[in-house]
Amino acid sequence: MECHGRLVPLYVEIAPTEIEDRIASSHETVRSIYWYWQDKRGDRRMPARRDIDPIDLRFHLPRIILVDVVSDDRRFVYRLVGTQEVAGRGYDPTGRSVGEAFYAESQEAALASYEYVVRERRPFCFKDPYVTRDGWHEHEDTIYLPLSEDGMNVTMILVYSFSYDFRPRMDNPIMLK
């Protein structure tokens, strides 16, 4: 996006109330992950990774992604990618950077969601239909939730997506269990 002759990153001017409205109108599973995150953060700006118990989220784990925020050029690195997310992509991006292995309309759009979370230190919700770089039409509600080890800086992002039109790109149905 261009503004007064300079490039402006995506999602810079989205108000927190718009994000709250997006979350409120998201699929019920997206809202439940958000409420869980809210409960775990308590009075803090964001919870730590150690506050999130996989047992609490066991039914949602296939759709959860954890992304490390790193200080090198990779910026965001997939730490854990749920089995449904892997099946939907057709490969496992664990260990790769988001900029290299993104699943979005463009690299810029993928990175903008993560940048918003780090910059604002608050959740982001993406709800717009899009076409992936290999031509798949996607309609999903995705929430990006910041986690912090020191309470101030985002060190990890928990991502959860609900796909309205989920189609696996893998022949191995065991990946969906």
Image (cartoon, rainbow, N blue to C red):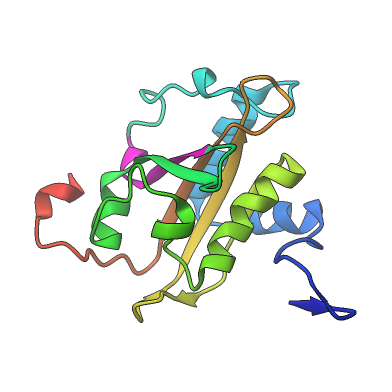
Regarding residue 25, the answer to whether it shows in the image is: no
32 left or right, relative to 18: left
Q: Could you say where residue 94 lies in the image, as x and y percent from the top left?
A: 33, 44
Q: Could you say where residue 6 lies in the image, as x and y percent from the top left?
A: 83, 75
Frontmost residue, 103 versus 163: 103
Frontmost residue, 107 versus 52: 107
Residue at 56 percent across and 41 percent down: it is: 72
- Residue 50 versus residue 155 in the image, above or below: above
**Residue 17 found in image quarter:** bottom right
Q: Could you say where residue 23 lies in the image, as x and y percent from the top left?
A: 63, 53
The C terminus - image quarter: top left
- Residue 149 versus residue 159 in the image, above or below: above
Regarding residue 85, the answer to whether it shows in the image is: yes
176 left or right, relative to 116: left
The N terminus - image quarter: bottom right
15 left or right, relative to 51: right
Residue at 43 percent across and 21 percent down: it is: 53
- Residue 113 versus residue 138 in the image, above or below: above
Can residue 60 be found in the magenta stretch?
Answer: yes
Can residue 103 be found in the magenta stretch?
Answer: no
**Residue 5 found in image quarter:** bottom right
Residue at 90 percent across and 79 percent down: it is: 4
- Magenta segment boundaries in residue numbering: 59-68
132 left or right, relative to 6: left
**Residue 151 found in image quarter:** top right
- Residue 36 versus residue 2 in the image, above or below: above
Q: Could you say where residue 106 lies in the image, as x and y percent from the top left?
A: 51, 72
Residue lying furthest right: 4
